[in-house]
Image (cartoon, helix red, strand yellow):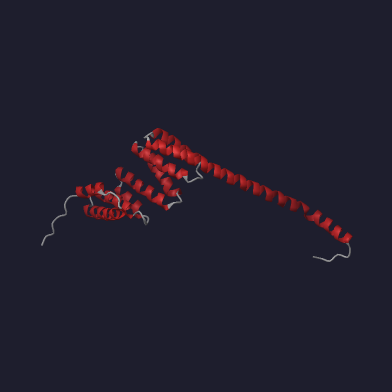
């Protein structure tokens, strides 16, 4: 900063500086305050949205437990539309997909499951949605597509679930050996995790007895 010969020179210099730069300073202050207020308002909006979405999702789960499929579909779609910026939108999509699949509305079910795969930040939810989507593909007579869907990713932590569904796909294709291998891997993984595998063992038994080795 320059050294002024007198206080008057300093005052005059300050006046000239203000005339040249004052408008920009005021504008910057206004924008800064506006940004701060805007951020606070946005934060408050996000918090409120999450809280409201949480309440709505709790009601959705109650409706799902009571088997109120129409209510689940309506509330779930509303959560997806109104609270898309919250994690509850993805969870609602899973619920809507379930009731849609249960009522054979497979177009709706597939759309919701695909949205979970595309939007969910949690890899676990993506795996669950992908496995359910593969099951729908099998039911629609597309077991090969189901296999491609499951084999497109590494199912870390969900290997047994994927193996079971791949077993279903192979069984639908008539690939008995591959189906048996998939079911056996799934049973081993689920047994280790303490998950009931009785229904899965029935699937394995339905494949038939292994042919005896010829000498």
Residue 76 seen in the current view: no
Q: Position of residue 205 (x, y in %)?
A: 20, 49
Residue 48 seen in the current view: yes
Q: Which quadrant of the structure image shows residue 101?
A: top left
Q: Residue at x 84, y 59 (%)?
A: 13
User: What is the quadrant of the C terminus in the image?
Assistant: bottom left
Q: Residue at x 32, y 51 (%)?
A: 161
In the image, taking residue 186 as reference, residue 50 lies left or right, namely right
User: What is the quadrant of the N terminus in the image?
Assistant: bottom right
Is residue 6 or residue 126 the one in the foreground? 6
Q: Position of residue 186 (x, y in %)?
A: 28, 53
Q: Position of residue 184 (x, y in %)?
A: 25, 54
> In the current view of this chain or complex, which residue is farthest to the left?
215
Is residue 153 or residue 14 the one in the foreground? 14
Is residue 174 or residue 109 the one in the foreground? 109
8 versus 49 height, above or below: below
Is residue 151 or residue 64 the one in the foreground? 64
Q: Position of residue 16 (x, y in %)?
A: 83, 56
Q: Residue at x 34, y 38 (%)?
A: 102
33 versus 1 height, above or below: above
100 versus 149 height, above or below: above
In the image, taking residue 48 as reference, residue 105 lies left or right, namely left
């Amino acid at each position: 900063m320059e050294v002024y010969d007198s206080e008057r020179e300093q005052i005059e210099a300050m006046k000239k500086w203000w005339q040249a730069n004052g408008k920009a300073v005021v504008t910057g202050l206004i924008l800064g305050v506006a940004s701060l207020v805007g951020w606070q308002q946005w934060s408050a909006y996000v918090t409120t949205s999450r809280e409201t979405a949480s309440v709505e999702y709790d009601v959705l789960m109650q409706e799902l437990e009571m088997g109120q499929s129409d209510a689940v579909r309506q509330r779930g779609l509303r959560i997806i539309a109104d609270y898309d910026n919250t994690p509850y939108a993805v969870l609602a999509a899973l619920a809507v997909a379930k009731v849609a699949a249960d009522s054979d509305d497979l177009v709706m079910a597939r759309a919701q499951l695909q949205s979970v795969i595309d939007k969910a930040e949690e890899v676990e939810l993506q795996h669950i949605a992908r496995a359910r989507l593969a099951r729908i593909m099998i039911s629609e007579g597309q077991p090969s597509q189901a296999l491609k869907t499951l084999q497109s990713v590494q199912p870390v932590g969900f290997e047994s679930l994927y193996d079971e569904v791949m077993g279903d796909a192979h069984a639908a294709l008539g690939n008995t050996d591959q189906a048996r291998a998939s079911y056996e891997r799934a049973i081993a993984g689920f047994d280790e995790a303490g998950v009931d595998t009785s229904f899965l063992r029935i699937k394995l038994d339905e494949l038939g007895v292994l042919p005896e080795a010829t000498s």
